[in-house]
Image (cartoon, rainbow, N blue to C red):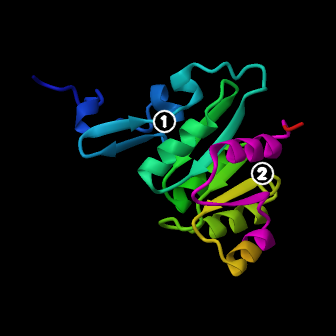
Amino acid sequence: MTEDASSPPPLDQGAIPAGSETNRLTDASIRSSHQSSELTSTAAEKHIDTSSGSVKTVLLIEDDHDLRALLELTLEAPDRRIICASDGCQALELARSLRPDLVLTDWMLPGLSGIEVIEHLKRNEETAGIPVIMVTIRDDKQSRQRAWTVGVFAFMTKPFRPAELQTTVDQALGRAP
């Protein structure tokens, strides 16, 4: 079978053209792992109606594939769009371009650490007001102090309780009672 140079490769080859118009919202949401594709939740893929403005965008930054999938399931809601990044550099680019309503990040990431991502966000006038929840395995006093110093909304340790995370996310998005 001959493939047209302009046509995207099939999914079973683990690639999707990130720059194409039809995949505009999936640039950071498509991952390839050993010839299989992982597609994360975005408004385009789940057909979420974003016209009312009530849909909140959450940028989820986690490098561990399984934990990212668990966090994504925990955060999933009809009025939420979850965008995923697996490293700090990609996350920073997404935060600057998409201006999410909330960032949920791990501390230890490839590229920039979660703390470095937060520092960059807080120094930028356009992203400084985005609340950030840190979810990390680090549970020492110095790590907690460092996170509070850079301006996290909340600090949670792994393993986390899904109900507690959901409540904290709702609070950060201004939806808690």
Question: At 63% across and 38% down in the image, what residue appears?
Answer: 75
Q: Residues within 10 Å of mark 2 (few under 14, many from 20)?
A: many
Q: Residues within 10 Å of mark 1 (few under 14, many from 20)?
A: many
Q: Which quadrant of the figure contains the C terminus?
A: top right
Picture residue at 48% right of the left edge, 40% below the top:
29
Taking the image as drawn, is residue 9 in sight?
Answer: no
**Does 75 appear above or below 114?**
above
Q: CA–CA distance between discs 1 and 2?
A: 22 Å
Q: Which residue is mark 2?
A: 130
Q: Quadrant of the N terminus?
A: top left
User: Is residue 168 magenta-colored?
Assistant: yes
Q: Which stretch appears magenta?
A: 147-175
For mark 1, what is the residue? 40
Residue ranking furthest to the right: 177
Discs 1/2, front: 1
Residue sitting nearer the eye, 58 or 20? 58
- Looking at the rendered structure, the kind of residue marked 1 is Thr
How many numbered callouts? 2
Task: Check if mark 1's residue and mark 2's residue have beta carbons within 8 Å.
Answer: no
